[in-house]
Image (spheres, rainbow, N blue to C red):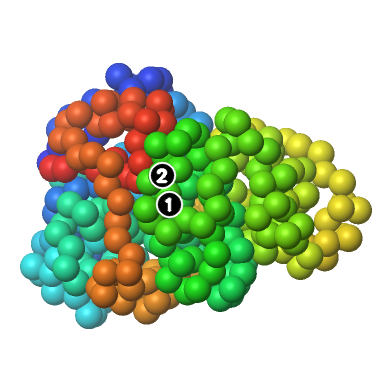
Amino acid sequence: MRAITIPEPGGPEALVWADVPDPQPAEGEVLIEVAASAVNRADLLQRQGFYDPPPGSSPYPGLECSGRIVALGPGVHGWAVGDEVCALLAGGGYAEKVAVPAGQVLPLPTGLDLVSAAALPEVACTVWSNVFMIAHLRPGETLLVHGGSSGIGTMAIQLAKAVGARVAVTAGGPEKLARCAELGADILIDYREQDFVQEIRKATDGKGADVILDIIGAKYLQRNVKALAVSGRLAIIGMQGGVKAELNLAALLNKRAAITATSLRARPLNEKAAIVAAVREHVWPLIGNGQVRPIVDRTLPMADAAEAHRVVDASVHVGKVVLTV
């Protein structure tokens, strides 16, 4: 088969579409013939040499895919050759075939084609696990999403609105904020021009956000705590703004607030399977009835993965950039 390889870490040009050995499904795995994959910022870090795949997983980038099952490993039940699916991966989505644990496979959602479905697994699992399973966002609460126009952000807006929460977003510029508003965002904050702490307090009569979903990390840590409501929950899922910051613990104590930080890729298989099962139970029906949908900015051929990385590097997209085989 062919796959996007990274002979040497570097810029987008480091991605090479090359012939590689076909994967074989191990015990409990299915083999998927890939129709499409989607670009995540973790792929950019892997390309640069900063984020190695977990031991034993595919060396190729790509944390999600869609396609058709073409083989079953020993011990697999509930799936059949020919099933159209999408899947959460530890790697290997930028390829013509990928082997994946059966517990990380999802059926194609009702009403979606394979290309659109490739944009779902990583964002749906990340948002559901952090905002709902860990931070327990409730109806009537306020969720602040940093990077509202990103793949994660566009999914978080829709899921939060679907459960009856109020949504605030930060994004860069009026065009991205307008797209967030189209998806249901109630409070629009241009981080280039406005202080999100002041804006969220103003919009909530001084209360603050009950839950914050943060992709920035260190740069926003102290301000995020200031923006939290009493008993608020800060869920950190990214480090685009650095890895080290000081925190006034008194501010955290005074708000009786909680900070969690998670990554999805390196979690044990049983934890990922539990998240995927929860997404299938809670998110898939919302996609099936049209309340939630994948937001695809553009599609590019898999062989043009370098161009897709340039797009994501430049942050000129809204939603996901999808690669098709």
Residue farthest to the left, as pictured:
82
Image quarter of residue 73: bottom left
Q: How many tags in the picture? A: 2
Quadrant position of the N terminus in the picture = top left
Label 1: how many Cα within 10 Å (few below 14, some 14–19, many 20+): some
Residue drawn at point x = 51 percent, y = 57 percent: 186
Q: Position of residue 199 (x, y in %)?
A: 67, 46
Label 2: which residue? Answer: 178
Image quarter of residue 125: bottom left
Left or right, residue 142 beside residue 76: right
Q: Position of residue 66 (x, y in %)?
A: 21, 56
Image quarter of residue 189: top right
In this picture, is 17 found above or below 71? above
Describe the element under mark 1 as helix, strand or loop: helix
Which one is in front, 216 or 144? 144
What residue type is disc 2 on?
A: Ala
Label 1: which residue? Answer: 181
Residue 54 visible, this angle: no
Residue drawn at point x = 17 percent, y = 52 percent: 115
Which one is in front, 238 or 19? 238
Residue drawn at point x = 38 percent, y = 56 percent: 183
Describe the element under mark 2 as helix, strand or loop: helix
Q: CA distance from mark 1 to mark 2?
A: 5 Å
What residue type is disc 1 on?
A: Ala
Question: Pointer 1 and pointer 2: residues touching (CB < 8 Å)?
Answer: yes
Left or right, residue 88 beside residue 193: left
Q: Position of residue 250 (x, y in %)?
A: 91, 53
Residue 289 visible, this angle: yes
Residue drawn at point x = 68 percent, y = 60 percent: 204
